[in-house]
Each structure stands twice: as C-alpha cells, then as structure tokens.
Image (tube, rainbow, N blue to C red):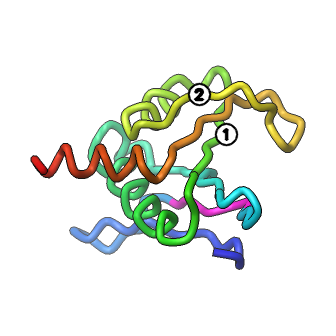
Amino acid sequence: MECGGTLIAIDQKNGQVIGSSRFYGYDTKESEIEIGWTFLARSHWGGVYNAEMKQLMLRHAFQYVNKVIFLIGPQNVRSQRSVEKLGAVRTTRPDTRGGNNLVYELAAAEFTKRALSKAGL
C-alpha cells in the first residue's frame, strides 16, 4: 500500500494489457487511501473490466483502511457514475491537491453491506 505502485489490468483471454490503476495518498491517521488514475483501453469501456478492477482493489484496501476516496474531474460523468455504482458518495471536503476535482468516499461498512446484499446474505 505504501509503495504507490501502479497496477496493470490484463485481459486473460489474450494476455494484453488493457489498462491500469493505482493506490495513492495512504493516510494512516485517517485510515484512508485513494484509488485513482484508472485508465482502460477504449475497447474495454462499458464492460465488466472497470468494476472488476475496482472490486479487487477495494477488497484489498479494506483489509488496511476504513475508507477509500476517489478524486474525479467535474466533467468526468462516466467515472462519477462508476464510483456511485460502487456505493461511493460525493463529499464536500476540498481536493487535497488544490484541484477542481469532486471527492467521493466509500466506507468499508458500506462496501461490505453492498457485497453481502449482492450475495443474497
């Protein structure tokens, strides 16, 4: 979590790299981390790839933190909808890097509740 490395997404059907994402801004005091800088090849937009990548990253992150944040540009409606589907909610706190991004938060409890609901538990 602390190394800040980028993760790559590989299409298991053909072994091609189709995108990347990363963890950033690990804050032990706030028990949070950012997931972002996610890119997918246009050929893989609109499918299961982004959601699957985020689910894997969230399951990993919530082993260590209580909250994940996403910084999203105001014009990036596609990404806003994507994180809202995960259960993230827009907050009013400022972008910590001084930008004009929207800040979304997802708490571990909400993520777990949604996962249990989807599993029918």
Find disc 1 in the rendering and name its residue.
71
What residue span does the magenta drawing correspond to? 20-25
- Residue 39 appears at what percent x and percent y? 54, 50
Instruction: Please tell me the numbered disc located at residue 94.
Output: none
Closer to the camera, 30 or 76?
30
The span from disc 2 to disc 1 (Cα, nearest Å) is 10 Å
**Within-10-Å neighbours for mark 2: few <14, some 14–19, many 20+:** some
SS for callout 2: strand
State whether residue 25 is above or below residue 85: below
State whether residue 45 is above or below residue 54: above
Q: Amino acid at mark 2?
A: Arg
Q: Is residue 68 left or right of residue 110?
A: right
Q: Earlier in the sequence, mark 2 or mark 1?
A: 1
Find disc 2 in the rendering and name its residue.
90
- Residue 38 appears at what percent x and percent y? 55, 51
Q: Amino acid at mark 1?
A: Leu
Q: How many marks?
A: 2
**Mark 2 and mark 1 residues within 8 Å of each other at the beta carbon:** no
**Within-10-Å neighbours for mark 1: few <14, some 14–19, many 20+:** many
Quadrant showing the N terminus:
bottom right
In the rendered image, the residue lying farthest to the right is: 98
Q: Main secondary structure of the magenta part?
A: strand
- Residue 45 appears at what percent x and percent y? 37, 40
In magenta stretch: residue 23: yes
